[in-house]
Amino acid sequence: MDFLTALINGLSSGGTYAIIALGYTMVYGIAKMLNFAHGDIIMIGGCVMYSVLSAKGNPLLAILAAVVFCVVLGVTIEKLAYKPLRGAASLAVLITAISMSYLLQSVAQIYLKSGTPALSALRLEGSVNIGSFRIDYSTILTLAVTIVVMVALSLFVKYSKTGRAMVAVSEDRDAALLMGINTNFIITITFAIGSALAAIAGYLMLCKAPILTNTLGSMPGIKAFAAAVIGGIGSIPGAMLGGILLGVVESISYSIPVLAPFTEAVEFSILIIILLVRPSGILGKMRREKV
Amino acid sequence: MKRTIIKVFAVCMCLALLAVSFAGCKKLEKDTYVIGVSGPLTGGNSGYGVAVKNSAQMAVDEINEAGGLDGVKFELVALDDQHDASKVETNYASMMDKGMHVALGCVTTNPCLEFAALSKTDNVFFLTPSASANDVVKEDNAYQMCFADGNQGSVAAKYVNGLELDTIGIFYKSDDAYSKGIYDQFKASLDDSIDTVEASFVGDATDFSTQIEALKDCSFIFMPIYYTPASNFMLQAKGKVADTATYYGCDGFDGIESADGFDISAIPQKVSMLSHFNSKATDGKAGEFITKYTEKYGKDTLNQFGASAYDCVYAIYNAMKAAADAGEDISPNMTASELCEILKAQFNGGFTFSGATGTNIKWQSSGYVDKEAIAFVIKEQG
């Protein structure tokens, strides 16, 4: 029974990781860059929810405002910081992304000052009880949102014109450009979707644990990045799989007292093992370098 | 004509330069005692740092108003480290630049370990109000006003041993020197007859579902962690841990009732903590401190870290005064190292102090404080 509870909790936190990982993996697949500021978008979303709630707005409005703000922020960051570096060395882009992450954290710190506010209004209390077995509403919500996002995104990529253009850009940007696809627009759309997902992930985190700090997104961001690599970076189902896997491992590791202190070590060793055994990730495409 | 102007200008500049350099020299003649402290003035743990800064400043102002030490005033240099050990080295260097004589070290534990190592090389005496790891006072120039983690653990265990419980829960942060330090000592001093259910977390984890699942049947949960994760735990444990349970923390719980957006009255369980300062005191030195602090800075940042810092400044002042009365030659021109030797002789030589955080406080030569703990209920059940 305990194992089952740990498993369900793991699926739930894994769902959150998966949604964050989608942002990483899509941006990597299409813009070929690692957006390390992605985790901090989550936290900025939290700050927006906090300010809306402080102004007596209702939770639904807060979430909506966070999604809109994050989309605008994500697109702006892309336009201001990343676009001028398109074609630059990947190291330069990486450093820019890391700086952007610290910039966002510092701005949030200025905004939050010394506070670590509790957004109690976002909290989803209560649970479904089946005998002594219990599933929180927040867990059910996270799982449901994860599934909906997964299905919607897959359908979008497979059937919509923009989605297919995204696949084309991720496979070969130059060829896509020659075929008349506006790659800049596609990259903008990718950042917009990724940032919206980050805001949603932020809500899913806060509805369980409502304390907002300026580093709220950094560890989940890094774990989601690991999840994206485990699943195969660039692959949408891979990000889902990696996220869920990481969440379940984390939860089970926490539930075993001997292993609990080493939970993060356990999680990241999975990354190392995957990189050793299957460098392109579980669902990643093996690519042979031509010399 | 133009040449002459240039020449005159050059001579003027030279004179100005000379004057500036002399001005610099004059400043080296010190006329105050400088007390340094580094703490989180911004960021997640700033409640602690701000309280320490305010209270230490208040003590310094009071001492100065009363004429200082034989007419020589004190000056506080408080710098921000955001609870980040990597910022301490820079802070320490700028304190030394400002002529630090003596220090309160750092407010939080991890940065203070760094401070301890740095201050040892210059032999700067420090008395920390709140950095509680045992290793903070490993060197002979370091003293604590708060209980060392090891002491907190054993004092807490002594309290729990007296409660006649069969099973208790423990929730701690396994990668944190503060939390793990208390946990180790607590386990070592806990009666063998008491079973423990343990859950832990690492890093910035915020989702505690799995840990709560493990601890949900405990009627008493010991939580040697800081208040941000603790309030997070309590919110998530609502309706899962029995309403009649008791949460029991150490000094990290301090300030939990004033955390932004966290309504402690919405938590059904009893919340209590081990302390050396009763923040609801109305009389005695503690009550006096509270009245003065609230008047000056309001209630938001009133906590035991501040009371402890207030005592630290006075303890250092009293020790310096006692040494001066005993015939030691103390002046602002002496080096930090010379003052350190004088203060060490005082602290190791039976110096006692009474303040807001205890009466007849003594220090062991190891740097640990020797005083009575009090149990403090933050919130009753219901």
Image: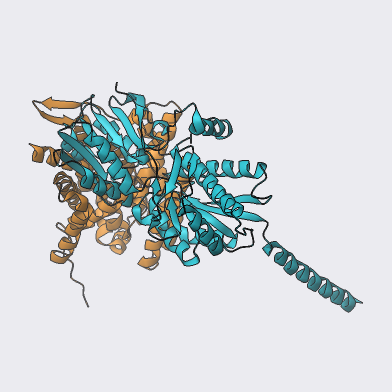
Chain colours: A orange, B cyan
Asked if residue B351 lies left or right of residue A23, the reply is: right
Nearest the camera: B190 or B214?
A: B190
State which quarter of the image contains the C terminus of chain B.
top left
Residue B345 point in image, percent of width and height: 49, 57
Residue A49 coordinates in the image, percent (x, y): 39, 35
Residue A133 vs residue B255: left or right?
Answer: left
Residue farthest to the right, as pictured:
B1
Residue situated furthest front in the rendering: B326
Left or right of B83? Residue B32 is right
Quarter residue A206 falls in: top left
Looking at the rendered structure, the number of numbered marks drawn on it comes to: 0
Camera-nearest residue between B132 and A178: B132
Residue at 57%, 50% (x, y): give it. B322
Rendering quarter of residue B140: bottom left
Instruction: Tell me if I can see residue A243 in this picture.
Output: yes
**Percent position of residue A271, x then y:** 19, 59
Q: Is residue B175 above or below residue A69?
A: below
x, y percent for residue B358: 44, 38
Placement of the N terminus of chain B among the 4 image quadrants: bottom right
Q: Is residue A150 visible?
A: no
Q: Please give the name of the residue rendered at 16% of the width and 31% of the height, measured from the top-left corner.
A: B217
Specify the farthest residue to the top. Answer: B382
